[in-house]
Image: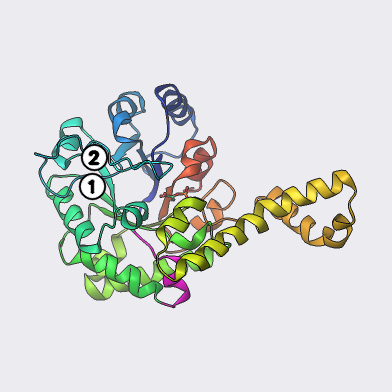
């Protein structure tokens, strides 16, 4: 039996009750392939889990964005680890038992925002995966390398080490979906192509084949999620000598991307000579954007079909676009 396509929507720390109702409405009314073809799992912030679960049609399932490494207890006030320095917070601390109690079948663990900001180690993530599985919660386990790691050629070693920390602690992979999320895909001026996604997915499958079993490698779903780091976060997350390089990479990407388009529009309107010199380059940018050719590493309605066509891409973990109607198109890419 083939691997069923999987689409996860990670809402991160977004939404009000009213917005949640609207998004759920769009999801409930969307014409999407049946559950036999695609498994859809929506992950709202912790406080909205019961609401989303009660409103969402039963074809879709719900996931928490994190859960604690062991049984809940004396962790007073640790519903959220909000840090005012950051613009968002998806770091709810709740125990797997609470998820069972709420009837939440899935949890996202090892998301790079948690690995980078909250310093969650491979071992800690592995422990959390093990504990969640032991409580009957299915896990979307995230792995992925940073820009520095990719540039130093250690992508496969990094994702292998992250996967190893899980495989050392669990033997049954049937309730795990592996999400490859290259941290470098956005906010750095770099572009994740479907071929690059496929390359890492294929390496991950080879790793599973060699280090777990051929069956695990064949049946485990490996999904793709390009990760949008905000400008502030990316600078925050790089330490030491790389901070400056990361800073310039971000400035570079902002200027190249949005800056060029704005400059083009302005130069055109004001009839500045700048427009004439750079019109070909700028037209190309506008062409790419207008025709939806991916200029970003995140999964969206425009690039999902091509990504889904890769042999080792078994679905997506979607951030920003899961809050928009285009999420329906992403689910449809399963067909
Ligand atoms: C994510 O955070 O899991 C993610 C994939 O984000 P985005 O799609 O916004 O890049």
Question: Which of the image's four quarters has the N terminus?
Answer: bottom left
Residue carrying label 1: 138
Which label's residue is closer to the chain start, 2 or 1? 2
- Secondary structure under the numbered disc 1 in the rendered image: strand
Residue 86 in the image: state x and y as whole percent.
41, 45
Horizontal side of 223 relative to 295 (left or right) equals: left
Q: Look at the numbered disc 2 and say if its residue's Cβ is closer than 8 Å to ligand 1.
A: no
Q: How is the image coloured?
A: rainbow
Q: Tell me: residue 171, above or below residue 301.
A: below
Q: Could you tell me how far apart the alpha carbons at marks 2 and 1 are, in whole angstroms?
A: 6 Å
Q: Horizontal placement of 69 versus 160: left or right? A: left
Instruction: Give the magenta part as a residue range.
Output: 143-153
Quarter assignment of residue 156: bottom left
Disc 1 CB within 8 Å of nearest ligand 1 atom = no
Whole-percent x and y of residue 68?
18, 46
Residue at 48 percent of width and 36 percent of height = 323
| Residue found at x 12% / y 48% | 70
Q: Secondary structure at mark 2?
A: loop
253 shown above or below 8: below
Residue 57 drawn above or below residue 211: above
In the rendered picture of this protein, how many numbered marks are placed on residues?
2
Please give the label number shown on residue 105: 2
Viewer-closest of 15 and 248:
248
Q: Is residue 317 magenta?
A: no
Whether the residues at callouts 2 and 1 have beta carbons within 8 Å, the answer is yes
In the picture shown, does residue 330 fall above or below 15? below
Q: Which mark is residue 45?
A: none
Q: Count neighbours of disc 2 (C-alpha within 10 A) and say few if under 14, some if 14 to 19, many if 20 or more.
A: some
């Amino acid at each position: 039996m083939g691997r069923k396509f999987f689409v996860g929507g990670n809402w991160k720390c977004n939404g009000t009750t009213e917005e949640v109702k609207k998004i759920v409405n769009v999801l409930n009314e969307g014409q999407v392939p049946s559950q036999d073809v695609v498994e859809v799992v929506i992950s709202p912030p912790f406080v909205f889990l019961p609401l989303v679960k009660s409103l969402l049609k039963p074809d879709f399932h719900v996931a928490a964005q994190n859960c604690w490494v062991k049984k809940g207890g004396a962790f007073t006030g640790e519903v959220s680890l909000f840090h005012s320095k950051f613009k968002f917070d998806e770091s709810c601390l709740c125990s797997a038992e609470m998820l069972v109690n709420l009837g939440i079948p899935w949890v996202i663990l090892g998301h790079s925002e948690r690995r980078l900001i909250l310093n969650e180690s491979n071992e800690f993530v592995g422990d959390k995966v093990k504990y969640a599985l032991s409580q009957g919660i299915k896990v979307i386990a995230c792995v992925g390398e940073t820009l520095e790691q990719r540039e130093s050629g250690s992508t496969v070693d990094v994702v292998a080490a992250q996967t190893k920390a899980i495989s050392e602690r669990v033997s049954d992979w049937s309730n795990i979906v592996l999400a490859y999320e290259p941290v470098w895909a956005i906010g750095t001026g770099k572009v994740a192509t479907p071929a690059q996604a496929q390359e890492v997915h294929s390496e991950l499958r080879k790793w599973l084949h060699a280090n777990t079993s051929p069956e695990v490698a064949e049946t485990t779903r490996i999904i793709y999620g390009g990760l949008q780091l905000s400008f502030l976060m990316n600078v925050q997350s790089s330490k030491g000598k790389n901070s400056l390089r990361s800073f310039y990479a971000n400035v570079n990407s902002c200027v190249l991307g949005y800056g060029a388009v704005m400059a083009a529009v302005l130069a055109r309107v004001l009839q500045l000579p700048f427009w004439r010199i750079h019109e070909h380059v700028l037209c190309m940018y506008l062409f790419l954007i207008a025709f939806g050719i991916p200029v970003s590493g995140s999964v969206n309605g425009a690039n999902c079909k091509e990504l889904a066509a890769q042999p080792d891409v078994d679905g997506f973990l979607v951030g920003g676009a899961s809050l928009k109607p285009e999420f329906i198109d992403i689910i449809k890419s399963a067909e």
